[in-house]
Image (tube, coloured by chain):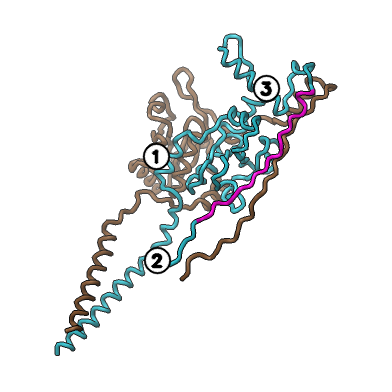
Amino acid sequence: MIKKQTAKVLALRYKFLAFILFILAGGLVLLPKYQKNEGIKPEQLLSNVISSERYISTDQIAHKIINQDRSAILIDVRDENSFNKYTLPNAINIPLKKILDEEASVYVNQNQYDVVFFSNDNFYSDQAWVLCNRLGYKNLHVLKGGINRWFNTIINPPKPTEDMPEEAFNLYATRKASSMYFGVVYPDQVGIKTSELVKKTAPKQIITVQKKKKAPEGGC
Amino acid sequence: MKEMEKIQRISIVSTLFILVVIIGLLTYKRPKNIFTINTKPSLEKLTTDNFFMTIENSNNSNFQLIDVRSSYEFEKGHLENAINMATPDILDEENLSIFKELKNKNKTALLYGKNPEDANPAFLILYQLGYDNIKILTIETSYFQNKLIAKNREVEKSENDIQAFITESAKNSDATSEIKTVQPVKKAILLQQKKKKKAEGGC
């Protein structure tokens, strides 16, 4: 008798367990929805976005280029036409559309170099930054003001007026000198020894980007 | 007797198992905000959709103006009928509920700040959270005699032809001089070919 009863209970138990496991398996159907939550949390992204740490000024960039600082990769996120028309020296063109492509991720997702996005202003470059930052990419920066500010500060710096402090004059002198480096010729510059100005070609810079190795996943 | 012990053990284990699952379910907190679009689709949408709005077209009952500048700036002056929602507070519950309400009413929220760049971060975050009823008002605001003045501004407009400016400057100085414009050499970049991913997992 006892055996029979226990057998009955046993069978029920298994049914019950199987039922619960079925329900749990049903939960798996809901999972794909949560995969969309890729990258960092919205709150984290917001706090990254409102800090202006990502911005780098045109003066800093000019300084870097002139000193042949190789720690930064400049990425032009405008379209190809604008890139061909004018871009910063040594910049790479990755249009905003392609910024998340496989080929682009070699430049964008690495730890060796600083990456500086720029566009005409800092609107599209900010968008590139936000998307990449959400994915957790490191060392990303944005050129504040973009190409337009580059023109207004470095290529064509405004001349300080008499009543401005000395710093303004110093800044102007630096900017003027850098604009000369980038090819602008000033009328008062002719007559000085020209030979010095002519060849200051930046040496070829070779960047080898190594893809981050991912830790193996899975396994038992 | 052995049989009985076995059954007991199974029942204990099964109740424990179920308990653990139930506790897990009860303590699981759904994150408050979840991105509903992944980065790639949102990039695709960002580059194809038009999400700009000029101020002339904004005077419509279908739109709700939202000022993302700080409350101090907002107090100083703002557009008519605008709501203040500073960018850092954009994920607050009441602010998000405003967006939800607008979405239910089929209204479009128009974000504006000091300039379009200023409204960009808030727009991007809300956009990725799934609020697609949001546009950016492309205006630049400034103050004139303590009154806010808004004027249209084209986003990402190329203001100057720099290459032309440089060649022009060389011409103006002295055509006969030997100065040549220096074009920094393009750097060669060696890419490491991406290796095929090895198969992951498996037993």
From this viewpoint, which residue is outermost toward the top?
A: A163
Density class for disc 1 (Cα within 10 Å; few <14, some 14-19, many ≥20) is some
Q: Residue at x 74, y 29 (%)?
A: A200
Chain A drawn in what color? cyan
Q: Which residue is mark 1?
A: B90
On residue B68, which mark appears?
none
Q: Amino acid at mark 3?
A: Ala
Instruction: Tell me the CA gap for discs 3 and 1.
Output: 44 Å
Q: Residue at x 39, y 35 (%)?
A: B85
Q: In which image quadrant can residue B77 be found?
A: top left
Q: Nearer the viewer, mark 3 or mark 2?
A: 3
Image: B67 above or below A18: above
The residue tagged 2 is A29
Which of the image's four quarters has the N terminus of chain B?
bottom left
Inspect this view and state whether residue A124 appears: no
**Which label lies toward us, 3 or 1?**
3
Total numbered badges shown on the rendered structure = 3
Which chain is displayed in brown in the rendered image?
B
Q: Magenta residues, as a range?
A: A195-214
Residue B153 position in % (x across, y down): 56, 31
Separation (CA) of disc 2 from disc 1: 32 Å
Task: Where is residue B29? Give x, y as percent.
Answer: 31, 54
Relative to residue A201, is residue A141 drawn left or right?
left
Residue B13 belongs to the span the image colors magenta: no
Estimate how packed mark 3 is, as few (under 14), some (14 to 19) or many (20 or more) residues with alpha carbons within 10 Å: some
Do the CB atoms of the residues marked 2 and 1 lie less than 8 Å apart?
A: no
Q: In the rendered structure, does residue A213 fall within the stretch colored magenta?
A: yes
Q: Are marks 2 and 1 on the same chain?
A: no
The subunit carrying tag 1 is: B
Q: Earlier in the sequence, mark 3 or mark 2?
A: 2
Q: Which residue is mark 3?
A: A177
